[in-house]
Structures are given as structure tokens and as C-alpha cells.
Image (cartoon, coloured by chain):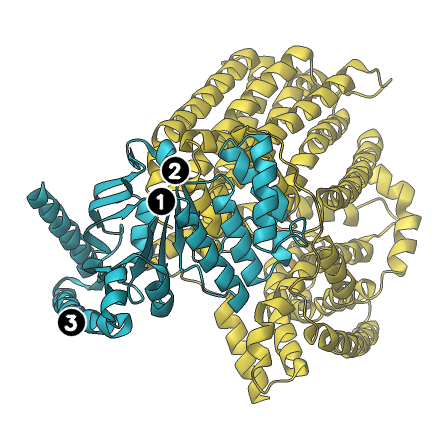
């Protein structure tokens, strides 16, 4: 037991470092305040939407009560999200390569290591549940006017709901780990196949959302729920244990105790199964060497003396053969056009409900058409920094190989150009495809559908705005990275998560996106009431800002960047 | 003719509280094997990184085949090949992809490349693994691919930082033999090492540095003729330097501690950094 508690302490010390070594206390507090503020804003938005949905589900026409079902689906949703987050976390924490060689030296069994590691994971799960599930339940309680004791049993939810994602994640962990190890360092073709599978999943998900929004738009949420109430109730009946949790809050005291008994019994059985299977499997994994799990052969023929081409090919190979952070970049880039296209369609459907209504004398249909461009701009410029932030590790990703870039007889400016172009070109192509899809959408008749899409001139404008902003984000991210690269921290390994600079670029991008998106929609509204700024004028202002933003940071990177690059001492 | 010329080299790292290279000067001649000796932290790797242009330096002149690394970096870089101490290579690439990438950067002709590639791969015994991904290579194989990449474009100067670390006896012998062959063709080799025996047997001359300062430039041919033991001489010289250097460091530490009591640890550290930078600037000014 003492060994396990020592291992748990070690895990926390190694994994949770609230104050970075290279940061002052002030900077750390500032960082955490910023993170908390962003999280609070996001959470507040999410809870507001959840509250509105809860009131819709729970106050329908007489004879239909979906209160329990709504909570059941909420818990299922939470469990699904937690399971998805848990699998990579388990892979990271249980990773046998990380500490295998260190721990094998000590008189500790694989069972002790496993138990200590899963306790740490469960602690993080509880924190996750506290941060997400507790506000959801409180919002639900307010929406249904719950009795006082409902709030008292919320800790029970926090404690027991995570058991089920935990069970599912442990069961999924071993096959996922096998696939991950198989994918790792395989050829570009394998990575692309993996990517295509994920894209197919995204398309499927977006089609489902679109279908839901369309149903709601054509009939309203109330009518949709009314028509499908039987199906919803029937489906929810099978969603145990979420249904048992929901029923804890509803019905008689006896029913409550029965459901609690079901939850407890399920918890004990599932935990026992999970630990039993995982312990056996983990022991097998633990004792096996995974260092050289896979590599492939390829004959690198000499293609001639074009240094630029060689550098581009090398960087692309490095990106395509990575299963870590670079893969995330590829994923974001490939889903950009899909999200632009689907979001545009979904937003249009969402506005259909109020298409023929008026707001303060304004025809909503006209407004809906007017802000189609602004929606595309908003979606694009919020997504772009997610992909462009990859440039904020352009230099750090070299790790120990940074010396190569300094040795070769290729100018730093040229190297920076290649590195930024490799990030820019896929993003630009993604935006181009997304815009063209929206334009095609615009030109096709959908009968009664209110789809407006984008006109040709709007596509061109969107492309320029997005391109200038992308160049700006990429240049700024790369410049930050040159000033403070993390090459020595990354060493011979691979970058696995966004750096601080990348997070800054994402935050900046989201702020600009929200700013422009909301201002754009306001300008469309202002045009309708013939007041102030016209939509056209706003679009030109947006274009001018993007141009200046892109130009300033590009000039900064290519003028001052080479000098700073030369000063890197890692 | 000097293939490598280092003159009055000064280097202080941005956040350092001591000087990593202080007024280092030496030359490496055509066809010479030159050793670079010193204990850990003596400044060997820093000097090599300055020579190769990997890190900037505060003052001094470094010329490779007559090309100034600061003023004319591309011509200077085209004339040397470098093997680092950490064997860092792009391990997602296969061996042949990596070598062809390097050859493209140095603008090799296709015919030359084919001939040279086949020769070096055979010479360094990587024929069976050359098309495998580098991440599957052992430590020694990574070192060998790093050596091939440094030699593929026939540089005039071959620079190696701790080249024998991690190599098996056969590979060490191969590298030593190739160094001799390389120098016999009129090209030059400079390498740093902790292995005094290797340096004694292989090098024509050697430089010993300690605390970033040159403490001796030794003619090893003369040593061999007179039967002087390099190991004993190295120990004597570094001991003398250590006594002096340790005292300087202790004084600096004491000064920082006193300062920390007065103005705080962080500010004291910064003040010491500024002091060292100022000291170096003064020395450079005096030299000029």
C-alpha cells in the first residue's frame, strides 16, 4: 500500500507542475487567471445553451414529460465525451515506454504500477466531472425547478458517473494502443488512410447534426420532440446506467434506492472486470519491449541538386510520418473545408425557422441571407488559427536537429520561407475548397430550402481575408518560436501537444474571429435598419485589417527573423 | 595553407554567468588531424559550435578555407562536414532519403552522388540498413549515418564532436582509418575527444582547453618522438588550470551570494550576467 501511495505521489509530481521552472510566480498566476477566464466564458456559453435546451425538453405539451429522458441523454453525452478524453489520457499515463526502464529496476510489481496509475487517472476524471457535470446538473435543476435534495445528491453523480467512462476507456485502451503503435512511424499512406477514416467520422457527425437542425428548423424543437417522444422514451429506457442516474432524481424514495442499488452493483462489477482484465493485459504490455515497434523501408533516390525542393520534401516527410502533433495539424486542415461547408448549411437551416418572421420590422429572411458571408468568415477565421498555430513550433519541432538548419548552406530567410509555406499552403487549399463548396451550394437550387451559400465575389473576398490572416498567424507564431524555441526540451523526441506560443495564436485567433464575426453580423443588422455601417463597408474594413495584420507580421518575420534565428543557442 | 583559422574567439551564452570561450586562437593545416582536448564543460563543444556557425559568437574571426563564417557563411559551410556529439539525425527518414537530402542541399551532381554514396555506405557498413527508417537504427548506426552525411559532398574539413562515443570497436577502427585516409588525401580533420589514447595515436597536433581558455597547443609528433606521455601531461596541465579556474569560479559564486543577500537571488543572477558580458566587452576592446 505504501508503495502504491509513493507511486501516486510520484505520478502527481511528474505530471502536474503548476509553476513552470522558467516562469515567475506572477507569470504563472497570470497564465492561470487567463485560462480560468477563457474556461469560464466558454462554460457560461455552454451552460446557457444547455439551460435553454433543458427548458424546451421539460416543458412540452400536456401528457408528454421528457424530464428523465433529457437527463439520461445528458449523462450519456457526458460519459461519451469523458470516454473520448480518457483513452488518450490512459495511453499517456499508462505508456509503457515512458517509465518502463526506470521502474523495472525497482522492486515494484506491474500490478502496483497499474493501480497507482489508474488511481491518478480516476482523480483527474473526478476533477473533470466536477468542472463539467456539476454545472450541467445545477443548470438542469434550475430548469426543472428541482427540489432542494436534488442539489444534495449531485456529489453522488460526480463520484459514480465517471466509473462507467472509466470502464469503457480501459476496455478500449488496449485495442486503441495497438492501433496507435501500429500507425506510429508508418509510411505516409498509412497516415493518410487513418486520416480518411477520421474525416469520414466527421462528415457522418456533421450530417447527423444537419439532419437534426433541419428537423428542428422545419417544425420547431417542440414539434420535433412531440413527434419523436415515443422513440426518445424507448431509446432512453435502454440507456443504463445513465437512466438509473436520472431516475435517482425523479419518482419515489423507494425507486431512488432501487436505482442507487443498481448503480452500486454495476459500479462494483464493472470496476472489478476492468481492473482484472487490464491488470492481466497491462502486465503483458509492461514486460514487452516496444521501443522499435515499427519502421519501414524506402529507397531515397537522389533527385538532383535543388535545395529548396529537398527541404520541402524532407519537412513533408517528417510531417506525414508523425502520429503526434503534426497529425493533429493535418486533421484540422482536412476538416476545415468540411466545417465551412456544413456550418454554412446548418446555420442557414437554423435561420429558416424565423425566415418569414420579422424582428423590429426587419425581414429575417433577408437578414439570414445577408449574414451568410459573415458566418463563413467567422467559422473560417476561428478555424484558421487552430491549424496556423502549428507554425508556432516550426523551429522547436527540429529538436536536436536544429543544428542541421544552421549548418546547411541555405539562407535562414529561405528556410523560414519553406517552413511557413508548408503550413500556409495546406490551410489555403483547405479554405479554397471550403469556399468553393459553399459557392456550389449557392448555385444549386434546394427547393424550399433557404440555403444561400456564398456568391463568387464573396468567395474571393473570404479567400483574401483568410489568406492574409493565416499568413499573419503563421508569421507571428514562427517569430515567437524563433525568439524562444524549445528545441532542447523536445530533444530527440517529438512534439506531442501545442506549445504556449501555439495556444497564444489560437486564443488570438478566436478573439479576432469572435470580434469580426459578431461585428459582421451586427453590420448586417445595421444595414437592414439602414443605420450606420453598411455590410460592404464592413467587409472592406475586415479585408484591410487582415492585410495589415498579415503584412506587419510577415515583414517582422522575414526582416528580423533571420537575425534572431542566428542567435538561437540550442 | 590553413584550412581552419580561429582567431581571438570569445563566446558568452545569453544567460551565462561565465565565459565559455575566451580568446581562443589556433589553426588547422591542410592534411592535418587535429585533436581538441578538455574535461567536461571545458568549452570544446562551444568552440566547435562557433566554428560550424551553429551558435553566434561575441568576437573573433573564424575562417574555413579562407571564407569567414560570419561574412561569407554559405561558402564556409560548403567546405566542412560536421558530426555532432548527440548523433541527431532526422529519424523519420530512411538512411538513403537522409543522405540524398543532404546531398541536394550541397548541390551534388547525380553521377558524383551515386559513386560517393555507394562507396561510403559500403565503407561504413550500412548496406543492409540504408533503406530502413533511421529510428530503427542502433546508436552506432546513427553515428555512422551521421558520418556518411558529413562526408557525402566531399568537404575539405571534417569536424567531429566526440565521434567515438557509443561506437563498437570495429566502428571505432573504421572511423580512425578513414580519418587517416582523409588526411592523407590533403583534407583536414578536427575532432574533440576525452580519449587521450586515440588523440595521442591519431593526431598531429592537439589543443587543450580549460574553462574556455587555451592552456596548451601540443605537437604530438614531437611528443611521440620524445616519448612524452600525453595522459600525464594532460593531467598536469588541467590540474594547474583547475586550481586557477576553481578559484575564479568560487570568487564569482561568493560575489553572487553576497549580492543575492542584498538585492535578491534573481536580480543577483542578472547582475552577474551583465558583469560577465561587460568583462568580455572590455577584453575584446583591449584586444582590438
**Dots 2, 3 in contact, CB < 8 A:** no
Mark pair 2, 1: CA separation: 7 Å
Residue A70 is situated, as x and y percent measured from the top left of the image, at 78, 53
Vertical comparison of A20 with B24: above or below: below
Disc on the earlier residue, 2 or 1 = 1
Which of B9/A68 is in front? B9
Label 3: state its secondary structure: helix
Residue A149, position as x, y percentages in the image: 67, 69
For the residues beneath circles 2 and 1, the answer to whether they share a chain is: yes
Can the viewer see residue A318? no
Subunit bearing disc 3: B
Cα distance in 3D space between marks 2 and 3: 36 Å
Say which residue appears at 13% left-offset and 49% top-offset. Answer: B278
Secondary structure found at label 1:
helix
* Figure quadrant of residue A462: top right
Give the crowd class for mark 3: few <14, some 14-19, many >=20 residues within 10 Å. few
Determine the chain carrying the residue at label 2. B
Q: Which residue is mark 3?
A: B240
In the drawing, does residue A94 fall left or right of residue A506? right
Letter of the chain shown cyan in the rendering: B
Q: Earlier in the sequence, mark 3 or mark 1?
A: 1
Are the residues tagged 2 and 1 within 8 Å (C-beta)?
yes
Q: Residue at x 67, y 21 (%)?
A: A372
Q: Which residue is mark 2?
A: B77
Q: Total marks drawn?
A: 3
Residues B138 and A445: in front is B138
Pointer 1 chain:
B
Q: Earlier in the sequence, mark 2 or mark 3?
A: 2
Circle number at residue B52: 1
In the picture, one chain is yellow; tell me its letter. Answer: A
Amino acid at each position: 500500500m505504501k508503495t502504491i501511495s509513493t507511486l501516486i505521489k510520484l505520478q502527481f509530481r511528474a505530471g502536474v507542475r503548476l509553476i513552470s521552472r522558467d516562469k515567475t510566480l506572477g507569470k504563472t498566476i497570470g497564465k492561470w487567471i487567463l485560462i480560468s477566464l477563457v474556461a469560464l466564458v466558454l462554460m457560461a456559453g455552454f451552460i446557457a445553451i444547455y439551460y435553454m435546451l433543458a427548458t424546451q425538453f421539460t416543458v412540452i405539451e400536456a401528457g408528454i414529460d421528457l424530464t428523465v429522458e433529457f437527463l439520461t441523454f445528458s449523462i450519456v453525452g457526458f460519459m461519451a465525451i469523458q470516454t473520448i478524453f480518457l483513452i488518450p489520457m490512459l495511453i499517456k499515463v499508462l505508456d509503457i515506454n515512458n517509465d518502463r526502464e526506470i521502474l523495472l529496476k525497482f522492486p515494484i510489481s506491474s500490478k502496483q504500477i497499474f493501480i497507482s496509475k489508474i488511481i491518478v487517472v480516476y482523480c483527474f476524471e473526478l476533477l473533470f466531472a466536477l468542472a463539467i457535470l456539476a454545472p450541467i446538473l445545477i443548470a438542469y435543476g434550475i430548469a426543472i425547478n428541482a427540489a432542494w435534495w436534488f442539489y444534495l445528491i449531485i456529489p453522488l453523480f460526480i463520484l459514480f458517473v465517471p466509473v462507467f467512462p472509466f470502464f469503457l476507456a480501459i476496455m478500449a485502451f488496449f485495442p486503441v494502443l495497438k492501433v496507435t503503435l501500429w500507425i506510429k512511424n508508418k509510411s505516409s499512406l498509412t497516415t493518410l488512410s487513418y486520416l480518411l477514416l477520421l474525416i469520414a467520422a466527421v462528415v457522418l457527425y456533421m450530417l447527423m447534426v444537419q439532419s437534426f437542425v433541419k428537423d428542428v428548423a422545419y417544425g420547431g424543437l417542440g414539434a420535433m420532440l412531440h413527434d419523436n417522444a415515443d422513440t426518445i422514451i424507448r431509446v432512453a429506457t435502454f440507456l443504463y446506467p445513465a437512466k438509473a442516474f436520472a431516475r435517482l432524481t425523479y419518482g419515489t424514495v423507494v425507486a431512488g434506492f432501487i436505482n442507487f442499488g443498481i448503480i452500486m452493483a454495476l459500479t462494483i462489477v464493472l470496476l472489478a472486470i476492468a481492473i482484472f482484465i487490464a491488470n492481466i493485459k497491462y502486465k503483458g504490455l509492461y514486460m514487452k519491449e516496444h521501443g522499435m515497434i515499427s519502421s519501414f523501408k524506402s529507397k531515397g533516390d537522389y533527385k538532383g541538386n535543388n535545395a529548396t525542393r529537398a527541404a520541402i520534401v524532407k519537412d513533408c516527410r517528417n510531417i506525414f510520418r508523425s502520429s503526434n502533433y503534426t497529425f493533429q495539424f493535418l486533421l484540422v486542415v482536412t476538416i476545415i473545408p468540411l466545417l465551412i461547408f456544413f456550418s454554412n448549411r446548418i446555420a442557414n437551416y437554423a435561420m429558416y425557422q424565423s425566415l418569414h418572421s420579422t424582428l423590429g420590422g426587419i425581414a429575417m429572411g433577408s437578414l439570414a441571407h445577408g449574414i451568410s458571408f459573415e458566418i463563413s468568415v467567422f467559422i473560417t477565421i476561428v478555424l484558421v488559427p487552430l491549424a496556423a498555430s502549428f507554425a508556432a513550433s516550426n523551429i522547436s519541432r527540429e529538436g536536436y536537429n536544429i543544428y542541421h538548419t544552421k549548418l546547411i548552406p541555405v539562407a535562414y530567410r529561405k528556410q523560414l520561407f519553406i517552413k511557413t509555406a508548408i503550413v500556409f499552403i495546406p490551410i489555403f487549399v483547405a479554405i479554397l475548397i471550403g469556399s468553393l463548396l459553399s459557392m456550389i451550394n449557392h448555385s444549386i437550387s434546394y427547393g424550399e430550402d433557404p440555403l444561400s451559400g456564398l456568391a463568387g465575389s464573396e468567395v474571393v473576398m473570404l479567400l483574401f481575408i483568410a489568406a492574409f490572416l493565416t499568413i499573419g498567424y503563421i508569421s507571428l507564431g514562427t517569430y515567437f518560436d524563433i525568439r524562444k524555441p524549445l528545441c532542447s526540451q523536445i530533444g530527440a523526441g517529438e512534439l506531442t501537444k501545442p506549445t504556449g506560443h501555439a495556444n497564444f495564436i489560437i486564443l488570438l485567433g478566436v478573439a479576432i474571429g469572435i470580434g469580426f464575426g459578431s461585428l459582421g453580423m451586427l453590420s448586417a443588422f445595421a444595414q437592414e435598419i439602414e443605420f450606420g455601417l453598411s455590410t460592404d463597408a464592413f467587409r472592406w474594413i475586415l479585408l484591410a485589417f487582415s492585410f495589415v495584420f498579415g503584412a506587419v507580421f510577415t515583414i517582422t518575420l522575414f526582416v528580423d527573423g533571420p537575425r534572431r534565428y542566428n542567435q538561437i543557442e540550442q | 595553407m590553413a584550412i581552419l583559422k580561429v582567431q581571438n574567439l570569445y563566446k558568452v551564452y545569453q544567460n551565462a554567468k561565465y565565459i565559455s570561450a575566451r580568446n581562443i586562437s589556433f589553426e588547422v593545416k591542410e592534411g592535418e588531424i587535429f585533436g581538441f582536448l578538455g574535461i567536461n564543460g571545458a568549452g570544446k563543444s562551444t568552440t566547435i559550435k562557433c566554428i560550424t556557425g551553429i551558435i553566434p559568437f561575441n568576437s573573433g574571426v573564424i575562417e574555413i578555407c579562407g571564407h569567414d563564417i560570419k561574412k561569407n557563411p554559405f561558402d564556409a559551410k560548403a567546405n566542412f562536414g560536421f558530426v555532432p556529439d548527440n548523433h541527431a539525425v532526422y529519424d523519420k527518414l530512411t538512411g538513403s532519403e537522409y543522405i540524398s537530402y543532404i546531398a541536394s542541399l550541397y548541390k551534388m551532381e547525380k553521377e558524383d552522388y551515386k559513386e560517393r554514396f555507394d562507396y561510403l555506405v559500403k565503407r561504413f557498413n550500412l548496406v543492409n540498413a540504408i533503406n530502413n527508417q533511421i529510428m530503427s537504427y542502433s546508436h552506432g548506426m546513427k553515428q555512422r549515418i551521421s558520418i556518411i552525411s558529413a562526408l557525402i559532398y566531399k568537404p575539405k574539413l571534417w569536424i567531429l564532436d566526440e565521434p567515438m562515443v557509443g561506437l563498437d570497436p570495429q566502428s571505432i577502427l573504421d572511423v580512425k582509418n578513414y580519418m587517416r585516409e582523409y588526411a592523407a588525401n590533403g583534407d583536414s580533420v578536427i575532432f574533440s575527444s576525452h580519449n587521450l589514447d586515440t588523440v595521442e595515436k591519431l593526431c598531429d597536433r592537439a589543443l587543450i582547453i580549460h574553462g574556455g581558455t587555451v592552456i596548451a597547443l601540443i605537437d604530438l609528433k614531437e611528443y611521440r618522438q620524445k616519448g612524452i606521455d600525453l595522459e600525464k601531461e594532460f593531467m598536469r596541465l588541467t590540474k594547474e588550470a583547475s586550481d586557477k579556474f576553481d578559484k575564479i569560479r568560487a570568487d564569482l559564486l561568493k560575489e553572487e551570494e553576497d549580492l543575492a543577500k542584498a538585492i535578491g537571488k534573481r536580480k543577483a543572477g542578472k547582475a552577474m550576467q551583465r558583469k560577465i558580458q561587460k568583462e568580455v566587452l572590455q577584453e575584446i576592446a583591449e584586444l582590438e
